[in-house]
Image (cartoon, rainbow, N blue to C red):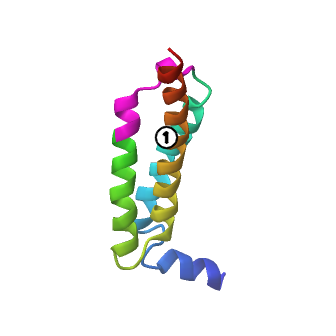
Amino acid sequence: TEILRTFWNSPVGPKTTHFWGPAFNWSITIAAIADTKKPPELISTNMTSVLCVYSAMFMRFAWMVRPTNYHLLVCHISNETVPLYQKRFVNDLVLNL
């Protein structure tokens, strides 16, 4: 119970936005993973590019904010890699046309 109490009262615990922001941000990653099953012509290159820029900016924020928010950092690393994987499919579609 001491471990749970420590987590509950930590500066990045569930009583703060440092926890709930990344928790809900995972829905972006889950949606991007679901989009990998879609045909490449349905994936928006503009939205994929914006998501990559957004995640890159907020990776730095997650690293620089005090206390360092590793949960947010890992979430944005995932948000960066999944759309880049999708972009490969879009590029294959464009290059093969």
Q: Is the residue 96 above or below the residue 36 in the image?
A: above
> Which x, y percent locates residue 9?
48, 79
Q: What residue is rendered at 34% in x and 49% in y?
A: 54
Location of the N terminus (image quadrant):
bottom right
- Vertical relation: 75 (above or below) 53: below
On the question of residue 81 being in view, the answer is yes
Helix, strand or loop for the magenta stretch, by majority: helix
Q: Quadrant of residue 12?
A: bottom left
Mark 1 highlights which residue? Answer: 83
Q: Is residue 17 visible?
A: no
Across the whole image, how many numbered discs are drawn on residues? 1
The amino acid sitting under disc 1 is Pro
* Residue 72 higher or lower than 78, as above or below: below
Q: Residue at x 63, y 82 (%)?
A: 3
Q: Residue at x 52, y 61 (%)?
A: 74
Q: Nearer the viewer, residue 25 or 61?
A: 61
Residue 91, relative to residue 52: is it above or below?
above
Residue lying furthest top: 97
Q: Is residue 87 magenta?
A: no
Asked whether 43 falls inside the magenta stretch, the response is yes
The stretch of residues the image draws in magenta is 39-49
Depth check, front residue: 26 or 62? 62
Q: Residue furthest bottom?
A: 2
Residue 59 appears at what percent x and percent y? 40, 62
> Which residue: 40% across, 66% down?
18
**Around disc 1, counting alpha carbons within 10 Å, would you say few (fewer than 14), some (14 to 19), or many (20 or more)?**
many
Residue 19 quadrant? bottom left
Q: Secondary structure at mark 1?
A: helix
